[in-house]
Image: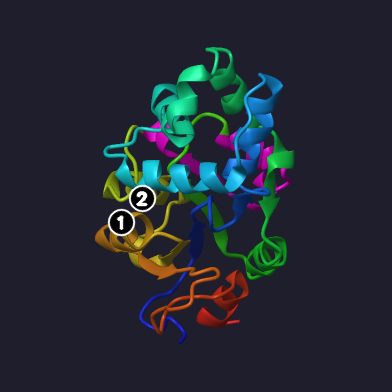
Amino acid sequence: MKIEDGDIRAVTFDVGGTLINPWPSVGHVYVEVAREFGVEAEPDFINWRFKDAWKSAHNFDYSRTAWFEIVRESFGIEGAELPDEFFPRVYERFADPDVWIVYGDVMGTLEELAARELKLAVISNWDDRLIPLLERLGLTRYFDTIVASCNVGFTKPSPVIFEQALRWLKVRPEQVLHIGDSPIEDCQGARKAGMHARLIARGRFTKAVDDLSSLREVLDLLPA
């Protein structure tokens, strides 16, 4: 369904789960690094533990300390056997582009939106690895601005991070459509800031009528 109640001038995007995703998975990367230190684990087990740790995290600030705690919890008892050098190595590994995959519907969609002369931006809860990572993945060239929580001091769903993006884009809230994979951080946060929002529900069995299955569907929301 097209967005008719606004003159959309800009589209903003979340990053993880929207534009890119760990590859093959968080668990595979953790295990790969752990083996460098002689620690064996199963990726499926680590993925299960990671998801549980992530759901349990409160007021996550995306600092190194916060990430290290997630890693420790992901390994459970085995976390006690990991040397101190393991944690910065994992942190550095996720700055490498080869442990991320850009979804196949991303670049073509961004190119089409840019061809329509729309402003494009990133609004992401991330740390200082974000911009170098997006540069190495070939994505920064598409965006007028990249707003990371580490630089703003507020994380989604706080309206502050969205308002910062609006100031840098020089557009009004009702002129912006935000796309992300979190109902709370992305959709509720953007709407609280006065923006339009749509959830991208990649691979989900159930989704609301306005949810997107592919980023290409963004093109159908906007006038050509």
The stretch of residues the image draws in magenta is 130-152
Q: Which residue is mark 2?
A: 162
38, above or below 125, in the image? above
Name the foreground residue: 111 vs 200. 200
- From this viewpoint, is residue 124 visible? no
Disc 2, SS: helix
Give residue 132's quadrant in the image: top right
Q: Earlier in the sequence, mark 1 or mark 2?
A: 2
* Secondary structure, magenta segment, majority class: helix
What residue type is disc 2 on? Phe
6, above or below 143, in the image? below
Q: Which residue is mark 1?
A: 189
Name the foreground residue: 72 vs 160. 72
Q: Is residue 165 magenta?
A: no
Disc 1, SS: helix
Name the foreground residue: 42 vs 125. 42
Rendered-image quadrant of the C terminus? bottom right
Residue 118 on image: x %, y %: 57, 64
Question: Residue at horizontal 46%, vertical 87%?
Answer: 1
Is 12 placed left or right of 167 in the picture?
Answer: right
What residue type is disc 1 on? Gly
Are circles 1 and 2 on residues that touch, CB within 8 Å?
yes
Question: Residue at horizontal 51%, vertical 57%?
Answer: 13
150, above or below 85, in the image? below
User: Circle 1: is it few (<14), some (14-19), or many (20+) Cα within 10 Å?
Assistant: many
User: Circle 2: is it few (<14), some (14-19), or many (20+) Cα within 10 Å?
Assistant: many
Q: Is residue 140 magenta?
A: yes
Question: Residue at horizontal 47%, vertical 25%?
Answer: 79
199, above or below 65, in the image? below
Give residue 100's quadrant in the image: top right
